[in-house]
Image (cartoon, coloured by chain):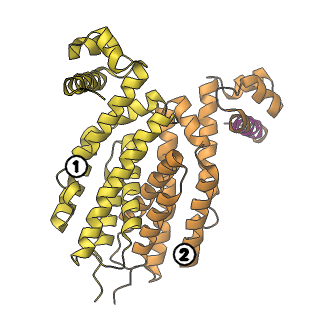
Chain colours: A orange, B yellow
Amino acid sequence: MLTKKGAATRQRIIEAAAAEIREHGVAAATLEDIGRRSGTGKSQMFHYFPDGKDQLLLAVAQWEAGRVLEDQQPYLGQLTTWEAWHRWRDVVVERYRRQGVHCPLGVLITEVGPKTPGAQAVTRQLLEQWQHEVRQGITAMRDSGRISRDIDSDRAAAALIAAIQGGVTILMSTGSAAHLESALDLCLDYLRLPVSA
Amino acid sequence: MLTKKGAATRQRIIEAAAAEIREHGVAAATLEDIGRRSGTGKSQMFHYFPDGKDQLLLAVAQWEAGRVLEDQQPYLGQLTTWEAWHRWRDVVVERYRRQGVHCPLGVLITEVGPKTPGAQAVTRQLLEQWQHEVRQGITAMRDSGRISRDIDSDRAAAALIAAIQGGVTILMSTGSAAHLESALDLCLDYLRLPVSA
C-alpha cells in the first residue's frame, strides 16, 4: 500500500513517462529522461517499478486507457438525453480524428506485447468499462421511455463498442474518420427507432 | 508480364510460403523451407521476388486478403435475399471464431510493417472490395424493395465493415465472438427496418 506521497510520486513518474513517450516514441524514452522529467532518481524509480521498464510501460498504458474514457466525459457518464448521446458521438469522432494514425495506448500495448497478460488486462478493462458506461446510458434511456424496450441494452452496447473499435482501427490505417462516423451514426439511428406503443 | 507457366510457379511459391507461415510463424519460415515446399530453387525465388522476403510476404498478404473474401462466398457476392444475408453473417462469424486469436493476414501486415505503403495498399484494397460487395448487396435489396429507400447504402456498407473490423479486433484480443455477433446483428436488424410505404 502506497502512502499519499508515494502515490503522488508514482503518478508523477507515470505522467512524465507518458509525456516522454508521446513526444519521442516508446523506444527513445529512456528511464534517465523520465527520471529527469519527473524529478525522481534511479532508486525511486526502482522502488515504484522494481520489475523495470515493462512494468512502467504497463502503468502508463493503464493511465492512457483512463484518459480514453476521461476524454469522453462528461457525456459518456450521463447518456440520459439524446443531446448527450449526440455530443458524445461528436466528442468520440473529434478525439480520434485529432489523434489520427498515432495511438498512444496502441504504441504501449504493442511494445509490451498485445498477447501478454498485463497488456490484455488493460485492453479488456478499458473495453469493459467503456461498454458498461454505454450500457448504463441505454438502460437509462429505456427506463425514461426514450429508447424502445424492444432494444437489448447488452447487445446494443457491445455493438457500439465494436463499431467504435472498428472505426478507429480503420481510421488509424486510412487516416479517414468516415467509417467511425458511419458506424456510430447507424447505431444511434438504430437506438432512436420509434418506441412502440 | 508473366507467362502462364511463370504465373503458376509464382503462385506455387506464394501458397508454399503461406502454408509455411501458417504452420511455423513468419519468423521461422525461411526462404529455404519455402523453396523446398514449392519445389523451386533459389534462382527461381529470386526471379519472382527479386526484392527478397518482404516482397514475398506482401504477395502472401495479398493472397491471404483474397482468401478472406473467398471464405465468404458465395454469399458475399449475392446478397440479394435475407436468407443470403443471414448465411453470410453466420459464415463471417464462424470463419473468425475458427480463426481465433491468430490472424494470418495480420501477422504478415505486422511483419512487413502496418505503415508501409505496400501493407497499407493490401489492407485498403481488402476493405474497399469487401465494402463494395456489401454495398452492392444493399443496393440490390433496395432495388427489389426489400430494404427501405431511406437507408443510405454507402453509409450502411461502411458501418458494416467497421462493425466486422471492430468485432474481429475484439475477438482477437478476448477470444470471444460476442461483439462481432452483436455488431453484425444490430446492423442487420437496422437494414431490416420496415420499408415505409
Which residue is identified by label 1?
B72
Quarter of the picture containing the C terminus of chain B is bottom left
* Above-or-below relation of A165 to B138: above
Q: Which residues are magenta?
A: A8-18
Quote the CA–CA distance across marks 1 and 2.
39 Å
Image-quadrant location for residue B150? bottom left
Q: Residue A116: x and y, percent?
A: 46, 30
User: Is B165 displayed left or right of A169 in the figure?
Assistant: left
* Above-or-below relation of B35 to B157: above
Q: Is residue B102 visible?
A: no
Which is nearer the eye, A115 or A91? Answer: A91
Which residue is identified by label 2?
A80
Q: Is residue A25 visible?
A: yes
Which is nearer the eye, B14 or A32? Answer: B14
Q: Who's the residue at 33% across and 29% down the image? A: B60
Q: Residue A74: x and y, percent?
A: 64, 66
Residue type, label 1: Gln
Magenta stretch: dominant SS? helix
Mark drawn on residue A182: none
* Above-or-below relation of B120 to B155: above
Quarter of the picture containing the N terminus of chain B is top left
Q: Residue A94: x and y, percent?
A: 62, 60
Other-residue count near label 1 (Cα within 10 Å), few / some / many at <14 / 14–19 / ≥20: some
Q: Secondary structure at mark 2?
A: loop
Which is nearer the eye, A138 or B134? Answer: B134
Q: How many marks?
A: 2
Decide whether residue A182 is among the magenta residues.
Answer: no
Other-residue count near label 2 (Cα within 10 Å), few / some / many at <14 / 14–19 / ≥20: many
Residue type, label 2: Thr
User: Is A111 displayed left or right of B107 in the figure?
Assistant: right
The chain letter for the residue carrying disc 1 is B
